[in-house]
Amino acid sequence: MQKDKGPEIIAVGGGKGGVGKSFIAAGLATSLARRGYDTVIIDLDLGGANLHTLLGIKYPETGIGDFLYRPHSRDLLDYVTETGTRGLKLISGYGFIPGIANLNYFQKLKIIRAISRLENDYIILDLGAGTSYNVIDFFSMTESGIIVTNAEPTAVLNAYEFIKNVLFRMIEKQFSKNRQLLDLVKSHKKPGEHGESGAGMEALMERIGSVDQEAAALVRATCSGFSPALVINMASGPVAPLTEKLRAICRQFLSIDINILKPVPSDESVKTCLLRLKHVLVDNPDAPSARAICDMAEQLLQGGISLGRNAADVAGKTADVAGERLAAGDREDRELAALISDFYSGFQENGTAAAQDAGNSSPGPDHFIKPEMRFDQNSMLPRFLPISDFSSESDFFNDSSSALARIMSIADAEDALLAMESQEALQEKRIEIAEAWLSCGYTLLGSNQQKSAFKAFIRAYGLMPDSARISISAGAALLAQGRPAEALEILAKALKRHPSNPLLLYNHALAHFRLEQHGNCLESIELLASGGNLDGKAMALGACAAFRLERFSRALEFMSSLNGSGPWNRDLLSWNRAAAMIRDGKYQEAVMELDGIIKNSPEDSEAFAARGAALWQMQDMDAAIADLDRAVKLNASDINYRAARGTAAFHAGLLDKAVRDMEIITRLRPDNIKFRSLLDAINARLGE
């Protein structure tokens, strides 16, 4: 373990529980830290973590559980607990989190990658007992490490089984792309099959060589490079005969050579120290066990035994490539990535799976989150003539004191109209009556009698359809009644006679917008602009039409003249600007707008989702996922937010998070066969 090689990772494991793995790991880490090395020790005995008690800590405040389930950083050092020993930090596995002992594949990969990014001098891994895939994979990431056992026959047998399982796991990974060789290795691992009971590694290499000589050479190289160290803990007598016998068995059946460390003697002071939550190395450094551990650390430091693996080498094997691709060259990883990508690529906004084959390209944020403009209904109302224009009434109404009297007078005038024979007199009376209906309509409108007012405008139009004032009023009345097609017919005819009338143009634009004819709407607004007749409402309508046409830059131009005092308040304007900016690729500007919205409205899930999408586009994945987390918490029923978060997690390499969102989405859409089949395929692979 030469320090010019960078950080060294040393795993401490063993097949049997209760043999003192944590005691040895804590002692080795303490001894290295006391020699001036920056050391971190990680408790990976998840579900049964107690390493902290050996370091004098009752209740760690944070640890692996937070890193996996409540992450606020991708850096493991942000989850450390200080130990009181200078230069030694603890990342605890403590925590009552259901399922933490049963990591899935992606959670394990997340931890391995995080460990590979650490830059401490020494990184000590305290593993759990047994030979589960998680334990073996954590141990094999260093390719060697320390195996702790005691002199009991069952413990020694478990140590051998542990060594054998680690070695076979390493070989299996070498052949993950070759099903024939992989099956051959797995069958050889089980005694009694193919008449190979008791056959050693040489026999396996011979069988592999009959298929592929290069593969056999690879197995031999793997065996030569695997040289774990064995330490007998709690030794109460000579252990050399036992260790030499185990070494001989490993040579004969596994074709490997194990290193033997000096034994750690049985020591009553250890129990006394543990009751005080102290390690014997700290509380009684002159005790026999403490001296033995110090000798072990010195033995390793002198370079007589190579155990640790350079963290850069581990990083090379598990290169963090932001989740777009997993470990290079690993077929199983690529297939898992393809399944996850297929799930999210096939996701559509309504929560269904796409009918077409989505392929393996992973979607971006705009696949799930497309911010739309928010409309203030008051800014999208039709425009009538100013009521003030009718404050001075014509002589026709001079003797009428109420709207009812006026209507009766108009009715009498219409009766007189029928009796007229002179065309000239008839036209004059028609104009007079139409103007009367128009004036009456605005009188009623001013009294909030809208239905009656609208009827009056339509009566006026029937008498005088060529009038711009009456066409404006009748068209606006029809728009207010939700009859945009009829309004458009009236307004279009009027514009042929009065092509530059601002109120006609605005209502004409609004009618097209209501009919979702956004291109025609924008044409009318542009005519208003060319005539210098754009006001706040017209600019807001133009921005909406341009946005719907995906002319986001033009929408932003319209909004640039709005200052929050027009039809949209400042928050609404800020949101609409942010939505257009995101759709126009102006992500930094959008984030600045959304910062203000979120400050004023911290419960706005849509704002968090939009900002998360913008940050994702800027490749600030940690911040993006944090915002999407918040959006999901504020609106847990929005399946698009979950899909966006899961895909962002996939891009960031947080594959466990991506799979969890897949599971939730599948539960929310139980009838979606594609989702279920993809998730089943993922779970089948995670079962290892």
Image (tube, rainbow, N blue to C red):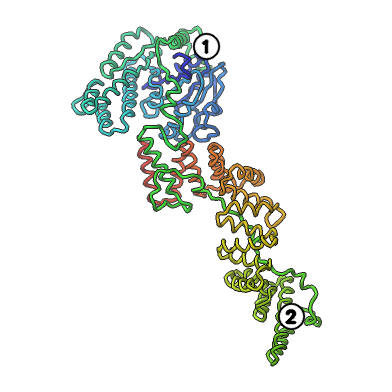
- How many marks on residues? 2
Looking at the image, residue 146 lies above or below residue 593 = above
Provide the residue designation for mark 1: 35
Q: Are marks 2 and 1 in contact (CB under 8 Å)?
A: no
- Nearer to us in this view, 232 or 30: 30
Task: Give the residue displayed 36% in from the left and 7% down from the top.
Answer: 237
For badge 2, the amino acid type reads Leu
Provide the residue designation for mark 2: 404
Task: Give the residue displayed 38% in from the left and 15% down from the top.
Answer: 229
Residue that lies at the very extreme toward the front in this rendered image:
530
Crowdedness of circle 2 by 10 Å Cα count: few (<14), some, many (20+)? few
For badge 1, the amino acid type reads Arg
Disc on res. 223: none
> Hey, which quadrant is residue 313 in on the image?
top left
Return the disc, 2 or 1, that comes first in the chain's sequence: 1
Looking at the image, residue 20 lies above or below residue 642 = above
Residue 248 in the image: state x and y as whole percent. Answer: 28, 13
| Secondary-structure class at tag 1 | loop
Residue 78 in the image: state x and y as whole percent. Answer: 55, 28
> Hey, which quadrant is residue 154 in on the image?
top left
Quadrant of the drawing holding the C terminus: top left
- Nearer to us in this view, 310 or 421: 421
Quadrant of the drawing holding the N terminus: top left
| Relative horizontal placement of residue 316, taking residue 526 as reference (left or right) | left
Crowdedness of circle 1 by 10 Å Cα count: few (<14), some, many (20+)? few
| Relative horizontal placement of residue 97, taking residue 507 as reference (left or right) | left
Looking at the image, residue 600 lies above or below residue 417 = above
